[in-house]
């Protein structure tokens, strides 16, 4: 059975799931089985979220923390894209570079970004470099991998065509590999943005001034679990918005591509 | 100049001994400005012959050379027209044709002049700004031929260039290629499995055996064409009706059928 589900039904079912989840959560809190410190109720979290929108906590309002976080994220993410995409394309073109870099890269990418926290603190102190480094560690691998795949799966006939036209490597990379890899690179950026944003809380554990992660650490220190959860909600919402935007961009590119093929 | 020479050429895909032997003892010389078509049963290695001249494959045995220089890598002196066109989808018609000239560091004014001339010759002028996906198969192949011709190569390599086109378009393209080849002769190596096409276009037709492919026979078409004055007929169907044409075609058909029969025996 594979009935077609309409968009309206799909949205309705999504809300149903969310309502069940929130209802169960609220019920658990109200039943008195667990204390509010252990599990703040959804309504409390909502209240706290709304309060934090214009009241300062740990030095800034929630939008203020988010702005600080987003700036760090943007630096780390853009740095990852700026280094990762060219590296992936070059690895896809130069066999030698691929052989040299791949083993190292394949081992390093399994180290969770958060594992870099001690070194980020050691090398950068509480400056902006530390969190950027951790976000970079999360966002870098998908940029490299997808640019690499894009370059590897270019139609071999186009490479042959470029070769018989006497195209130098630099030009093959810029005018054949890169445009051909665009769809793969864009989906890489989407995954990369998600992982980078996820690494944020870890990154901000070592930041002493502002940021959603910092706000949550301060909430924890003050035994304000509802503040911690409001931070989680904010991270989730911004992550969702980011992914939606990149997904729309991806669809736009694919649609343009589809017309080209 | 553009003399292609195959000297005792063999090609084995995979390890010697256990690999697939695609070609064996190929000896063929294609003279300057001569148009040679290779026909053969599918899988006989005719495309591999072309790919070795292009520099996409290396010979396992023997030497493939152009003007005496053994071929090592692809280059714009040996332009290729592919069966599947292989145009860059993100480049306009103009930019597709321009790439090879840019690689040769031709000045921009000369590039513009040469591209305009070839667009005009191939009836593509009004499509200069179009992208490949906006064109029909026949038009796309015209762009691919223009992209090769604009480089003024010594050697033109055509790998079943009309194989992906419908029958009507194919005929038009064949007529145009004859027109182009007579006006602007090049050394052409043309791979096809269509016998009529080979006889209609080529000066000589080489027939290959089934794998491992060898040259079974080389037929001189040019002398017949000139003697019977085929080129006075503008339309392909008029040429195809001529007794001399039918005779050559039937000869090649028989020869190929023998190969097919041997394959199934």
Image: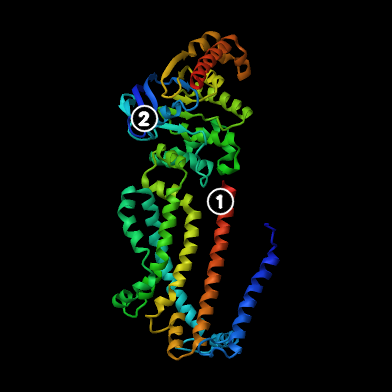
The location of residue B222, given as percent across then percent down, is 49, 13
Up the image or down, B252 lies above or below B155; here it is above
Badge 1: residue crowd in 10 Å (few <14, some 14–19, many ≥20): some
Give the Cα separation between the discs numbered 1 and 2.
39 Å
Which image quadrant for residue A105? Answer: bottom left
Check disc 2 and report its element: helix, strand or loop: strand
Up the image or down, B226 lies above or below B62; here it is above
Left or right of A99 on screen, residue A149: right
Q: Nearer the viewer, mark 1 or mark 2?
A: 2
In-front residue for pair A26/B104:
A26
Marking on residue B104: none
Residue carrying label 2:
B12
The location of residue A200, given as percent across then percent down, is 43, 74
Residue carrying label 1:
A257
Up the image or down, A163 lies above or below A56; here it is above
Q: Inspect this view and state whether residue A32 appears.
A: yes
What residue is at 41 percent from the left and 36 percent from the top? Answer: A164
Check disc 1 and report its element: helix, strand or loop: helix
Left or right of B189 on screen, residue B200: right
Badge 2: residue crowd in 10 Å (few <14, some 14–19, many ≥20): some
Q: Chain of mark 1?
A: A
């Amino acid at each position: 059975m594979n009935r077609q589900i309409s968009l309206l039904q799909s949205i309705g079912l999504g809300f149903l799931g969310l309502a069940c989840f929130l209802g169960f959560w609220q019920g658990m809190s109200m039943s008195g089985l667990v204390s509010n410190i252990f599990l703040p109720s959804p309504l409390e979290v909502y209240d706290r979220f709304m309060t934090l929108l214009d009241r300062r906590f740990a030095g800034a309002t929630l939008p203020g923390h988010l702005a600080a976080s987003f700036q760090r994220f943007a630096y780390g993410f853009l740095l990852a894209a700026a280094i990762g995409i060219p590296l992936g394309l070059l690895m896809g073109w130069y066999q030698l570079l691929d052989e040299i870099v791949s083993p190292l890269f394949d081992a390093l990418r399994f180290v969770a970004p958060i594992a870099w926290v001690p070194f980020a603190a050691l090398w950068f102190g509480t400056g902006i470099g530390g969190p950027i480094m951790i976000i970079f560690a999360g966002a870098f691998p998908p940029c490299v991998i997808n640019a690499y795949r894009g370059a590897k799966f270019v139609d071999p006939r186009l490479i042959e065509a470029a070769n018989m036209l006497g195209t130098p490597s630099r030009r093959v990379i810029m005018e054949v590999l890169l445009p051909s890899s665009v769809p793969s690179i864009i989906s890489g950026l989407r995954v990369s943005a998600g992982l980078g944003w996820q690494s944020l809380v870890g990154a901000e554990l070592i930041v002493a001034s502002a940021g959603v992660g910092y706000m949550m650490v301060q909430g924890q220190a003050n035994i304000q679990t509802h503040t911690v959860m409001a931070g989680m909600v904010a991270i989730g919402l911004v992550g969702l918005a980011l992914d939606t935007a990149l997904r729309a961009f991806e669809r736009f590119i694919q649609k343009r591509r589809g017309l080209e093929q | 100049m553009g003399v292609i020479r195959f000297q005792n050429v063999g090609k084995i895909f995979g390890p010697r001994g256990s690999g697939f032997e695609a070609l064996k003892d190929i000896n063929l010389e294609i003279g300057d400005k001569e148009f040679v078509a290779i026909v053969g049963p599918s899988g006989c290695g005719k495309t591999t012959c072309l790919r070795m001249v292009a520099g996409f494959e290396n010979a396992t045995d023997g030497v493939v050379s152009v003007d005496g220089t053994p071929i090592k890598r692809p280059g714009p002196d040996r332009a290729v027209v592919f069966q599947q066109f292989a145009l860059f989808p993100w480049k306009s018609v103009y930019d597709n044709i321009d790439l090879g000239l840019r690689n040769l560091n031709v000045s921009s004014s000369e590039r513009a002049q040469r591209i305009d001339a070839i667009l005009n010759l191939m009836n593509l002028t009004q499509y200069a700004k179009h992208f490949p996906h906006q064109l029909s198969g026949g038009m796309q192949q015209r762009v691919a031929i223009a992209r090769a011709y604009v480089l003024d190569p010594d050697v033109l390599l055509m790998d079943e260039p009309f194989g992906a086109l419908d029958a009507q378009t194919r005929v038009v393209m064949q007529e145009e290629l004859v027109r182009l080849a007579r006006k602007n002769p090049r050394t052409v190596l043309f791979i096809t499995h269509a016998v009529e096409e080979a006889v209609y276009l080529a000066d000589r037709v080489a027939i290959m055996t089934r794998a491992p492919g060898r040259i079974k026979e080389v037929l001189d078409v040019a002398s017949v064409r000139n003697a019977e004055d085929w080129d006075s007929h503008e339309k392909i169907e008029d040429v195809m009706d001529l007794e001399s044409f039918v005779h050559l075609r039937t000869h090649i058909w028989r020869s190929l059928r023998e190969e097919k029969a041997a394959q199934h025996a």
